[in-house]
Amino acid sequence: MTDATAGGMSAGPDRRSASLLTADPLMRRRNAAETRFRLYGVAAIMISLSMLFIMLWTIFSDGVSAFRQTSLTMAVTLDAERLDPQGNRARDDMMKVTTIGYTNLLNDALKSYMEARGIDTGEVSDRELSAFISRDTPAQLRNQVIANPDMLGQTIEVKGFATGRIDGYFKGRVTRETAQVDTNISVAQLELADQMREAGILTVGFNWKFLTNTDASDQRPEAAGLGIAIIGSAYMMLLVAVFVLPIGVAASIYLEEFAPKNRWTDLIEVNISNLAAVPSIVYGILGLAIFINFAKFPQSSPLVGALVLTLMTLPTIIIATRAAIRAVPPSIRDAALGIGASKMQTVFHHVLPLAAPGILTGTILGLASALGETAPLLLIGMVAFVANYPSGPLEGGMLEPATALPVQVYSWASRSDPAFIERSSGAIIVLLAFLLVMNIIAIVLRRRFERRW
Amino acid sequence: MNDMRIVERAVETRNIKISARGVQVHYGDKHALRDVDVDILDNTVTAFIGPSGCGKSTFLRCLNRMNDTVAVAKVSGTILLDGEDIYDRRVDPVQLRAKVGMVFQKPNPFPKSIYDNVAYGPRIHGLTRNKAELDEVVEASLRKAALWNEVKDRLQEGGTGLSGGQQQRLCIARAIATSPEVLLMDEPCSALDPIATAQVEELIDELRASFSVVIVTHSMQQAARVSQRTAFFHLGNLVEYGETGAIFTKPSDPRTESYITGRIG
């Protein structure tokens, strides 16, 4: 008996004889494989996290400065002789004094203001001194004066932007070293800027205008803002939500609950999945052909943008909604049908409320992807330079030209002045804030609708 | 007590409630049910027994046309409820299901309050005129389902928070709130523990006074305990149908005997 057992042991590895306290070679190999696999996973997550961190870090380090801006404050006497040569305060006559007239007035005013404050301009020429004033300031002042001619003759305090290079000096983008090779700015100007900052003429503060101003030309990056892009994106999100929710939910409910399962519905299903994978620029071409060339909707308008983005997000939302509807346990449908609820009552009283959290999450994620979409908007002309705010949503603002946040990022990033790079990153921060808000809404809504069963 | 029950039984009127003739069910290519002829009596508990996949649940689901929801299912033959063909083109299955209620295998209360669970049927069928009447129906249904005393203080709490046995009784209350004429039960106790099972069985016996009850069960003991008549299904055929006592003591078909003694199934 014992011999037989001993023979069995020598014939092959007998597990019964092995101690539990020492791992056998096979076990060690299995454990090693498991450890390796875990390390791969941790490494993958570390790589993703570090990429995310690097991305956010570059965006924030470049972009946060866009929210701070250098302003130039000075006293200006609005000389009636120069601004209203006819002396009749008539709007049409005052319009004849162009921005150049105001520019000259401001240049002179800055010079005399500096003298009054006892700051020696030194080597800085008059021309170089006038380069401190943003080209945006005279235009703003002109608008104010024309709107309110009573201001003429008074001495008022004008607060405008300093030019991009001066602004960049206080943000560290422009230094004395770069100024030596930069034809737009001299070291003497930077020294003067330091003095003016001590005197309180130049101040750095939070830049609300970055969020409210319209886009600006290449010559005055300091005045460029996101106002129209924010409005355009908000209009589009509103319209996309209004279009996509009813269409997407109705299509999903029909396909999931009512449609017969046959070749046609299979075909539709396959095509919805395919449409979700179509590159977004294709939807841009479609929108250009259908909504602008055929239906003659106004170019660059949030309405057309929203229609294109609706087409683009619809497949995603239908897929998400169908998944949410399918996740409702069939026993709930049986229960409702079993007590004599009609198909529609079953769907609306029981299935939809249970699927609502999933539908909302899917919809908001779809909207978030639409918010970040650039390519189709370029094709329908939303990349255009828009100087005027669109009207309110009820006054046809959805039909007036606007841009969108991602498009603004794109167009600023392609401009030459480094001040626009900062603004481009700043716009990305605003875009990310939008996305964050939408995701928070999704989470709150899901929590609110979520029920156990 | 027992004597009284015999007296009760003696005065019962045993009308035919549902009459099925030549019922065939196909699921696609599969012939799930062949030529079933059954008469289901009023105020009687009828049990369907048989091994898994024998067609008993399929037949039960024919009785309130729940098979309509299965796209591939095709039902032929006639099923008369009080003499009317329920598969007639003019019959709306929704209306039929208000008359023929159903309780499912797994307790499936709606994720709503206990009150709303029971009130749902009367609400959609417009059975009550005002809140007071609805309250009354809810209370009566919960009392009939022997659940009232346990939940009367928490009617607004979720129905899914109850225990399994309570949930199943809630589903029974929900089914009887629409005052159906027939109550179909598809293995109502298979997800319940023995105590809850006993409660539901007792309840089924009480419900017999008001409805015709049809119950599908895997447990022969349960069929013997609660039913007056039993039908034995095997491989899609109705093998034997008759008084429960007769089926269990002297089955006429050898297959029934084999199943009851545990040799097939």
Image: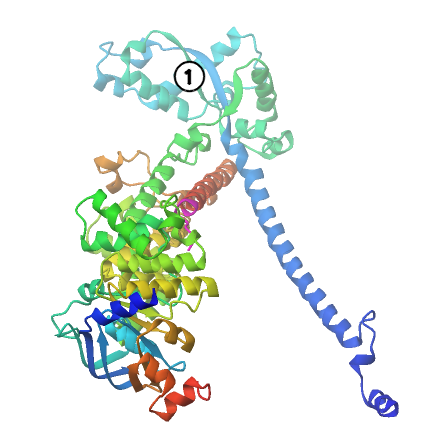
Across and down, in percent, residue B210 comes to 24, 63
- As drawn, is A190 to the left or to the right of B207? right
| Vertical position of residue A433 compared to residue A170: above or below | below
Q: At which x and y percent is residue A66?
A: 50, 33
The disc numbered 1 marks a residue on which chain? A
Q: Is residue A3 above or below residue A288?
A: below
The residue indicated by pointer 1 is A106
Q: Is A318 part of what is drawn in magenta?
A: no
Q: Nearer the viewer, residue A149 or A57?
A: A57
**Magenta segment boundaries in residue numbering:** A446-453
Quadrant location, the C terminus of chain A: bottom left
- Which residue is drawn at the image coordinates 49% and 22% (left, top)? A71
Mark 1 crowdedness (10 Å alpha carbons): few <14, some 14-19, many ≥20 = many
For the N terminus of chain A, which image quadrant? bottom right
Question: Going 35% across and 66% down the picture, which residue do you hit?
Answer: B104
What residue appears at the point 60 percent right and 34 percent down from the top-left corner?
Answer: A181
Using the rendered view, name the quadrant where residue A321 is placed.
bottom left
Task: Tell which of A88 and A408 is nearer to you.
Answer: A408
Taking A202 as reference, is B118 left or right?
Answer: left
Residue A121 drawn above or below residue B47? above
